[in-house]
Image (spheres, rainbow, N blue to C red):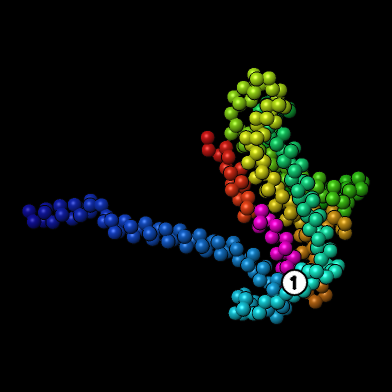
Amino acid sequence: MKAQTAMATRYQAYREPPSEFASNTKRIAGKVAIYGLLLLWTFIALFPIYWTITTSFKVAVDVTQGHLIPFVDYTPDWRGWRSIGLSPDTIFNTSTVREEFMKRFMNSAIMSIGASLLAVILGSLAAYGLVRFDYKFAIWRNRDISFFFLSQLILPPVVLAMPFLVLYKELALLDTRIGLIVVYTLMVLPIVIWIMRDQFRGIPVELEQAALVDGCSTWGAFLRIVLPISLPGMVAAFILSVVLCWNEYFFAALLTSTNANTLPVMVASQTGSQGINWWSMAALSTAAIAPLAIVGIFLERYIVKGLTAGAVK
């Protein structure tokens, strides 16, 4: 009898729910683990940016010895920024290097923005057609055409090196902004099409049908109804395209030489007979990163809203 009672007591204790203290401790431990992992990943993701920014304020000995903490391991110096004419003591003086930097900066800005605008316009039209109309090319249907656009991202850029060189030489587009804008547009067009395709899928077709009943044409319904609703997605696609074009190096180095060089090419050229000028390269990289960082900080909510619109129906 006693044995049965003891077994019943142990079974009842096993069936009893854990105490509130144990439950709270487990929940707090889970949150600590999650936030600890997030902090670790944040450190890993941001450390290259921190290293780049701090390196722009180092001299050669600080770079080679791996000093990391300013005012503790080393005293910051403007050598990197002075080498590109952007230090406080050179910013108001005439500087050939700064003029070269501004030229490359403007090349990157013009070609990135121009290619992104063109890609968003063409990609939006293509995506709308794939969503609202049925196409048939031999055995290809809308899904096959969409996958064809996506498959272009799998193709390594080096495969296109020789064809583009020959074609651009014949068309006299080597070392021109127009030539690079065309390449960048083709590069980001598949991404824009897939982003905008999801945007248009999330817009009820009944809205367009109502606009047609009210007297709008197909283009009128598209311009007055569909485009305003899909604007967040267009903004997200545009910003993503600008980032990809801004950071592109392969085609910029392949198809340009002097007039249309971009910032990534200028950053990669910071080498000399004595090795790599780390401080100069870091200063150029920081100046190239800054515009994208500002755009990301101030337009983050538009990017997230555009990329997630239509994901939940």
Percent of width and height locating residue 288: 73, 60
Relative placement, left or right, of 151 versus 178 is left
Relative placement, left or right, of 157 versus 172 is left
Dividing the picture into quarters, in which one does residue 196 lie?
A: top right
Q: Mark 1 highlights which residue? A: 88
Percent of width and height locating residue 211: 64, 23
289 part of magenta stretch? yes
Q: Nearer the viewer, residue 21 or 156?
A: 21
* SS class, disc 1: loop
203 part of magenta stretch? no
**Mark 1: amino acid:** Pro
Residue 76 in view in this figure: yes
> What residue is rendered at 70% in x and 36% in y?
124
Helix, strand or loop: magenta stretch: helix
Q: Nearer the viewer, residue 195 or 70?
A: 70
Q: Nearer the viewer, residue 262 or 172?
A: 262
Q: Residue furthest left?
A: 1
Percent of width and height locating residue 137: 73, 28
> What residue is rendered at 66% in x and 57% in y?
293
Highlighted magenta segment, given as a residue range: 277-295
Relative placement, left or right, of 71 versus 24 is right
Residue 194 in view in this figure: no
> What residue is rendered at 59% in x and 48% in y?
301
